[in-house]
Structure formats: C-alpha cells, structure tokens
C-alpha cells in the first residue's frame, strides 16, 4: 500500500467512525444527521481514492474516482448546511441552491467524465490519478468548492467575533479542525493539473475528525463526549491492530513462510500477538483518553469552592437553581443534571432547571411511590449500587430512565422534602463512588437550606408587592365617592346642555332663529360639552394611572412639587367632604430628583391618607416642598391626634398599627419607608399627642440639575 493509500484508509475509518457514532448518539437530531453527511463525504473520498489509486484497470479506476468525487461534491454542501444550523443562520434558500448545484455537478461527474474528471494517468510511479480535468470540473472547483467553503468559514469567523467563553473556544476548535481538513484536501488537487506535488497533505484530513473529537470531548462541542471517547478508542485499536498485522505479515512472509511453506499458517503468530495485546491496548487507550481528554477525577476542592463562592451566596431562586445545575454539569463533568422542587400550590415536584442535551420538562406527583420512598428513607438512590441487597422497584427504575439519572439525592430541610437533585452519567463513563457521595450529600444539605431561604425571600417579596397594591386599592376605594361626584358633575352638565337644546328645538323656541344662529348655538353647546368631558377624562386618567403598579423605572427629571400637586388634586375633593382642608406650600422651582414617578406618588398618597385618618372631625393638612442646598425637602403635616414616643419609634415596623383590628394591615408606612429608601430618600417623623404629626422626607437633587435654590418659604 502506498503512503497516500494509508492516509486515505485512515481518513475513511476516522471520518466514518466519527459520523456514525455521533448520529447514533442523537439520531433524531437534525444537526447530528447532517454531521454524518459531512463525515460520510470525507469517508467516501478516503475509501474511493484508496481503491482508485491502487488498481491499474482504466475503467475500474475511473469508476472509483467517480465514487470518491461524490464525497468531494457533497462535503462542502453538508458542511455549509451544518454551519447554518450550528450557528442558527436562516439561509434556507441558499442551502437549497447549493444542494441543487451539487446534484448538477454529480450528474456531470457520473455521466460526463470527459467534461469533469477527464482521464486517468499513472503518477509518481505509484498512483493512478485522474486528469487533466474538464471544463465543468474547473467551474466546480473555483465557483463551488472554494467559494462555498470560504463562505462557511466567513460565517464561523463572524460568529466567533461576537461570542465569548466556552462558545468562543468551541468556534475556535471548529475552525481549526475543519480548516486543517480542508487544507489537507487542497493538497490533492494539483496533481490533476499535472503539477508535481505528492498528495502527502491528505494526512491532514485524518487530523480533522481527531481535532474536532478533542473539541467535542474537552469543550462540549455537540455534547457527545462519551461517544467520541469510544470512537477514539476504536480508531486506536484499529490502527494498532492494523500496524501489528502488517508488521507480522511481513515478518511471517520473510521467516515463517520459508519454514512452514504455507502463507496462512505463517500468519498465525500475527493473530496470536493481536489477541494478546488487544485487551491491554484497549485499557491503555481508555485510561489515556480519560486522563488527557476527560480528566477522569474531578477536583473536589473546585466543587466546594464553586458552591461556596458562586452558588450558596445567591438569593434569587431562579438564578440559584440554574447556576447549581450548570456548575454540577461543568465541574463534575456530567452528561446531564436536573433539579426538581416542590410546588406547594399544585402539590407536585416540578423540574425547575436542567442541563445537558437531554433536558426536558418533567413533573412528579406527591403521591407517587417513588416520592414516598425517597421521602421516607431520606437517603440517596444509586442506579447501580453493588452494596444494595435488593434491586430497585420498577417504579424507581422508570424514574431513573425518564430523568436519565445515575443518582438521585433528596433535598430535605427540617425533615421536609423540598426537592430532588438528579445527576446523570459522568462523561468519563465512571460510576459514582462513595467518595462522590460523601462530598455531594453535605452540598445537597446546604443547597436545601439555600433553596428554602431563597423561596422565603421570594414569598416575602411577593407578599410585600401584594400588600402594597392592596393598600393602594383600599385608598382608591375611599376615593370612589369623591371621584364619582367629580365625574358625574361635568357629565351631568354636558347632558343638561344637550337636553335643553333638544327640548328648546322641539318646543319651537328656536323657530325664529336663522340657520346660522342655530349652528352658532349648537357650537356653543358643543364647546361646553367638550370642556366638561375633558374634566371627567382628566379625573379618570389620574385615577387609572395611580391604580397601576409601579414598574420601578427611575427617571432623572421627576419634580416633587408636580407629583405632590397631582396627589393633592386627586384627594382634595374627598377630604373636603370630611371637613379636612389642604394647604399647599410647594415651591414652583423645586429641583428635579432621580426617582420612579409612580412610586413617588404612592409615597405621598399613603402619607396624606394616614394624615387624614388621624384627624377627628374638622382639620388641616399642610404639604410643603422646597430646595435646600443639593436636597429637596418635603413636609406633610396634620393637626390630628398625634402619637406618643413609643408608637413613633415603631411606626415604620411591619404589621405595627394603632388602628382597630380589621381597619389596617400595618404595612402602609413600612412599605412607604422601603420605597423612599429605594428612591434614594430618607423619611422621619415628629409627633406629639394632641398636637398632630409631621412627616419629613429628604431626596437628593438630580446631579444634572442647574436650578438655583428656591427661597425658603417655610421655617423648618
């Protein structure tokens, strides 16, 4: 066999092996199927060119060259299609055109050999090579093979420029691996044009599946690590066995054949040696791939450090579960992992996060035997446990299969099952050991506490938001009478004007008026109707705007005075009905502040409402706002019943209230304080029994403000 023949054989074996194993690891995935097309094209070139270069019969050699070039024609098309899906580019029409062109060139290759491959020549005194090629071949090489490959690499480079981290590393390996393969194939073209260049670069084509295999193993490219390991072991066994067989066949022919005078008996030592070295060689290759590619033993210290620094410090539940699963997959080098948490409302265990290629939605009922068993025992469950006396029940086996798990660890807190941690196979094919369990169980216990804390924080946040909205809606309820009056008044006036016009028209009062006078009268009435409906519209818009929850959007040009006037305008009529007068002392040129406009209204509304509720009978509420230095000061003062020092020290505590049971939640001022501080403000209170209460609010002026300080209009 020639040197090129060896490279062609290795190209065919490694490419086909890689493609088949990838495909059968995910035969339902389109990406895997197209990858099989890419590697099959390279394999067809390898096997076809191997046979074509070794036989001297013109017809058979041309037939095998045609077969080889089917692979050459298809490879760039499949590669381009693979790149589009891998990088998520939507180029369906261009993909269809490339497949159509490939079909056209394949027809010329098979049926019009003179226009495509030309003829057969004996080159380098060892190879039967095609050429010189025909005119269609030249178009194929320049306008199809070269351009399509270059465009594919352009897409890869463009994606790599916008990617980072693991994704960028994957792109880099993909570019290098496929680029080496492409450059290796380029060295096989010059001979066709009678250029004296031996196709030694064909060995580079062998490297392309090896480099991509390394990237798949080390950097999770296409998530097929275990399959690639088996591919590499298989390729190593094949190459070693082939080398041993060829070596001993040569020795046998030189030595034993002269003794036994039988070629087949002379091969027996070769077979015997292969049988002896096969198992040790396989073990060596497995250990080598584990050591240099998979790093079989993960670092326990890295796992502890990762959980301590990156996982357990997270308070947001969604972030916590996602980072937990991702870090376990990354650090322990798992094929997949999942986290199921108990949903109290639905009484189910729901998969809240999953990692790996087999990630799917999954739900477990509380009443399932699997949950009862794992909750009762409180222990982890291994799929394969040599110390277990009895096999797993069929129910638990089914759950292991559905979750694709190797070990299930219950997450318990105070004897309650809060979740289940599912860990899939290790990428090294190694089973979970007692050392693994010894490190994972304490982490699971700590994770249970972190999850419980995150859930409590989430529930408290929801409760705060709901309580704040309930407080606001309660306020709106108290305004309904006043709002009804404000809306019905203008609408009643508008209706009355229209009815009067129609009655006068019917009774003939306008019979002596000219057409122009009637139009003028109708226009006058319509102007009044528009004015009154605008009044009603403004009031309803204010109420609707106030009722909507705040979105937490900070603006840098919020004027405290404008928001105070907005709130006073909304409540003033209702307060008048309760004999409460509102005095406004708001400076016109208060500095703008950075705050959420709606949250600021919510603050003022709650304080004004509390002031009104503290007044028994007739009273006054005074609102004032002014600038002082780089701050804006707001006072909301009432002449109500006031409060003692003990109550004043607790007024901002949650659930503290001096109202009768059922009259208040005790969360209004607590929420007000939270919102004030969230908007970079400060709130305090002064009060004396029988003398009223004043709330002091201070906000930092927006840094971009250039307003001059307004005159102090009220002694503080």
Image (cartoon, helix red, strand yellow):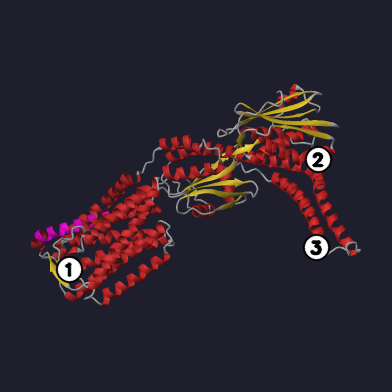
Nearest the viewer among 15 and 373 is 15
**What residue is shown with label 1?**
129
* Residue 662 place in picture, x, y as percent: 79, 37
Classify residue 150 as left or right of residue 496.
left
Circle 2/circle 3 CB separation < 8 Å? no
Earlier sequence position, callout 3 versus callout 1? 1
State the image quarter where residue 603 is shown: top right
Q: Which residues are drawn in magenta? A: 236-254
**What residue is shown with label 2?**
574
Of tags 3 and 1, which is closer to the observer? 3
Of tags 2 and 1, which is closer to the observer? 2
How packed is label 3: few (under 14 Cα within 10 Å), some, or many (20 or more)?
Answer: few
**What residue is shown with label 3?**
516
Nearest the viewer among 213 and 71 is 71
Q: Is 239 part of what is drawn in magenta?
A: yes
Q: Is 529 part of what is drawn in magenta?
A: no
């Amino acid at each position: 066999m020639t040197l090129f023949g060896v490279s062609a054989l290795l190209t065919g074996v490694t490419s086909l092996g890689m493609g088949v194993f990838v495909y059968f690891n995910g035969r339902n995935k389109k990406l895997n199927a197209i990858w099989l097309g890419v590697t099959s094209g390279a394999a067809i070139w390898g096997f076809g060119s191997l046979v074509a270069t070794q036989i001297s019969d013109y017809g058979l050699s041309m037939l095998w060259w045609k077969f080889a070039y089917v692979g050459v024609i298809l490879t760039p098309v499949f590669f381009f299609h693979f790149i589009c899906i891998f990088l998520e580019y939507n180029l369906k029409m261009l993909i269809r055109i490339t497949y159509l062109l490939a079909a056209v060139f394949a027809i010329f290759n098979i049926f019009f050999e003179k226009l495509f491959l030309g003829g057969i020549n004996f080159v380098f005194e060892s190879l039967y090579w095609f050429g010189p090629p025909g005119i269609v071949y030249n178009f194929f090489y320049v306008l199809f093979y070269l351009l399509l490959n270059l465009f594919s690499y352009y897409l890869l480079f463009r994606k790599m420029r916008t990617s980072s981290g693991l994704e960028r590393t994957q792109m880099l390996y993909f570019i290098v691996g496929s680029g080496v393969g492409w450059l290796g194939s380029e060295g096989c073209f010059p001979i066709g044009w009678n250029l004296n260049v031996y196709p030694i670069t064909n060995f580079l084509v062998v490297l392309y599946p090896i480099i991509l295999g390394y990237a798949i193993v080390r950097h999770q490219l296409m998530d097929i690590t275990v399959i690639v390991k088996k591919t590499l072991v298989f390729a190593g066994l094949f190459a070693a066995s082939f080398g041993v067989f060829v070596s001993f066949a040569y020795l046998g022919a030189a030595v034993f054949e002269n003794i036994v005078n039988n070629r087949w008996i002379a091969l027996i030592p070769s077979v015997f040696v292969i049988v002896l070295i096969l198992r040790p060689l396989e073990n060596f290759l497995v250990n080598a791939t584990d050591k240099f590619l998979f790093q079989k033993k993960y670092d326990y210290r890295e796992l502890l450090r990762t959980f301590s620094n990156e996982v357990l410090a997270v308070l947001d539940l969604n972030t916590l579960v996602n980072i937990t699963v991702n870090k376990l997959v990354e650090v322990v080098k798992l094929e997949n992992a999942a986290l199921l948490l108990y949903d109290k409302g639905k009484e189910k265990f729901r998969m809240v996060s999953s990692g790996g290629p087999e990630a799917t939605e999954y739900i477990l009922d509380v009443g399932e035997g699997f949950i009862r068993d794992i909750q009762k025992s409180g222990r982890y469950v291994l799929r394969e446990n040599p110390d277990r006396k009895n096999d797993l029940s069929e129910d638990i086996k089914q759950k292991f299969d559905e979750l694709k798990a190797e070990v299930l660890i219950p997450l318990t807190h105070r004897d309650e099952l809060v979740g289940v941690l599912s860990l899939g196979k290790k990428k090294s094919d190694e089973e979970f050991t007692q050392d693994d369990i010894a490190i994972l169980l304490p982490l699971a216990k700590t994770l249970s506490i972190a999850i419980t804390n995150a859930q409590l924080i989430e529930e408290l946040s929801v409760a705060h938001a709901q309580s704040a909205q309930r407080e606001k809606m309660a306020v709106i309820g108290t305004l309904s009478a006043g709002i009804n009056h404000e809306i019905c008044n203008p609408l009643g006036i508008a209706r009355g004007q229209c009815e009067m016009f129609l009655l006068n028209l019917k009774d003939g009062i306008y019979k002596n008026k000219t057409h122009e006078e009637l139009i003028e009268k109708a226009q006058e009435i319509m102007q009044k109707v528009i004015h009154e409906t605008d009044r009603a519209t403004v009031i309803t818009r204010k109420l609707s705007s106030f009722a909507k929850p705040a979105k937490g959007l900070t603006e840098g040009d919020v004027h405290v005075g404008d928001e105070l006037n907005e709130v006073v305008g909304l409540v003033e009529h209702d307060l008048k009905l309760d004999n409460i007068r509102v005095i406004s002392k708001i400076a016109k040129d208060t500095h703008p502040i950075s705050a959420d406009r709606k949250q600021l209204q919510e603050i003022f509304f709650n304080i004004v409402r509390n002031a009104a509720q503290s007044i028994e009978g007739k009273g006054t509420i005074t609102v004032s706002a002014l600038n002082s230095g780089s701050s804006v000061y707001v006072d909301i003062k009432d002449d109500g019943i006031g409060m003692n020092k003990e109550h004043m020290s607790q007024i901002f505590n949650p659930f503290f209230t001096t109202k009768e049971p059922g009259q208040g939640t005790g969360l209004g001022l607590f929420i007000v304080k939270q919102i004030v501080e969230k908007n970079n403000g400060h709130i305090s209170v002064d009060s004396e029994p029988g003398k009223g209460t004043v709330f002091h609010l201070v906000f930092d002026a927006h840094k971009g403000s250039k307003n001059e300080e307004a005159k102090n209009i009220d002694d503080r």
